[in-house]
Image (tube, rainbow, N blue to C red):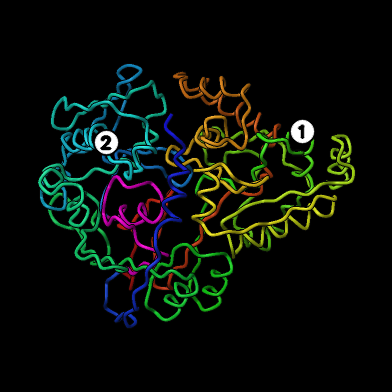
Amino acid sequence: MAQSAAVSRLALAVAVALTCAPLTAPRAQDDNTIRVTLATLPPRHGNPFATSATPSITTTSAIYDGLARFDKAGNLRPWLATAWRNVDEKTWRFELRRDVNFSNGAPFTAEAVVNAVTYMNTSVRPIDNLVRDLPAMISARALDSHTVEITTKDSVPSFPRHMPFLALPEPDAWRKLGPEEFAKQPVGTGPFVLQTWEPALASFAAFDGPGAWRKPKAARLEIRALPEATSRVQAILTGQADVAMQLGPDDLQTLEAAGHKGASWQDGGVTGISLVTTRNLPFNDVRVRRALNHAVNRAPLIATIMQGKTVAANQPAARMVYGHNAELPAYDYDPIKAKKLLAEAGYADGFSFVMETSTTSGAQLATFQQVAADLAAVGVKMEIRAMPGPQYLRNMFLTGEYADAVIVPWQTVPPIDVVRAVEIHSCDSKFPWYCDRDVMPLYQQALTEWDPAKALALRRELSRIYHEQAPAIFLYEQVIYAGLSARTHGFDDSFGLVAYDQISVNGN
């Protein structure tokens, strides 16, 4: 499988320069415009192949569609493709939706899929990170106007699970304009059409003409960059925004107290503190790793800091992820057991270690501080070393000069599959912080198993092994927070893809 997608997703999110534009006046009562605020806009406008990470995916999901889409429970549903099957171990055949047009009036056909796959295979540049998020595709060919076959480099039984993130641009406009100009004038099948792109404001008009298969309820969409979460909250409070993304749990309390709404959902990832086992550290002993998991009291973290919006984690896969093992026991909060395990490992007097993070404020930092207090109660001192994002990324992924413990998401996007999280936290990483050579054959077998029951069983076994080996202090399933104005209805986000066509304002 390709180099860890979470690395490129995290790197892009931190590397983007934050910009800001002044807000406009509060909306008029009859203004049928959805106003969304993000911390930043994508640096490459409407490029469909940039990345599957925020803010790109949050913006481009207004413009483009993929062949499939996940619902919030992690189930794969038809989208621009109505059905699919494997022809052989490296070939997939997709039946495409008919009577769908691009926003420029061109019909959606198999040619759009061929164009996208051809570009990713032959012309993609290093900054097009989506190529690292998806399995390598060798070619695509149209069998007829609405049937297409995609051939992959390797055998990928889970290939359709990646297809929600293969955005499909209109091929004639793509070839005519080229990637850079097309990104400024994108043409897709999504519910909105880009009109203008300023440094911190992207404006869209509804695509509701012939062949628009997801006609939006709103006439216009604005996506604005406001770097500070407090500014995004204030935009809701003053009637200048309808949706505020990338908030924290405390922000939702503020909005709800003022009569607005908070939204939260799991994104398929797990938050944890990864323990470095590839150097001579106490974490080389599994008893130490298990001890730290039993030393942390997750219940108050979730109830207070996370506002009860998530659940404790005990494995690399969240509940909606393909491969989650529901039979695994929780890491019970038991300081006595933790001290016993530490003593058995030769650390009866405890030890000290440094945990590095790029998180400098908010709920996650508060979580780490409480974890440090819990560990101190069993004699283990965790120093939290927060640093700027670029420095953190350089240490983690370019030089390997990271500390004793690190924060790297146990992320499963794009395929919402536990093997993606295992890939990130395994010997396959460039500078692995955890490497268990014995588990890699099982990981490879899970990647290539075609029998559905066996493939699921292998993934659940991976989850079980990672639970038992405890390569991280697993904390809780990742949760995303957004604020909604009182007049906003129908908002839905599935693993970064926003259903803009379902959002209504002013009762529309």
Q: Confirm whether the magenta stretch covers residue 68.
A: no
The correct choice, above or below, for 133 with respect to 494 in the image is above
The x, y position of residue 273, in whole percent, is 65, 47
Q: Which residues are magenta?
A: 34-62
Residue marked by disc 1: 285
Front one among 478 and 94: 478
Quadrant, the C terminus: bottom left
Cβ atoms under marks 1 and 2 closer than 8 Å: no
Disc 1, SS:
loop
Task: Determine the CA span between mark 1 and mark 2.
Answer: 43 Å
Badge 2 local density, few (<14 within 10 Å), some, or many (20+)? many
Tell me the number on the disc at residue 120: 2
- The residue shown at (65%, 57%) is 385
Extreme top residue here?
88
Badge 1 local density, few (<14 within 10 Å), some, or many (20+)? some
Judged by its main secondary structure, the magenta piece is loop
Amino acid marked by disc 2: Met
The x, y position of residue 25, in whole percent, is 32, 83
Disc 2, SS:
helix
The correct choice, above or below, for 352 with respect to 17 in the image is above
The x, y position of residue 482, in whole percent, is 47, 63
- The residue shown at (40%, 24%) is 156
- The residue shown at (37%, 29%) is 159
Mark before the other along the chain sequence, 1 or 2: 2
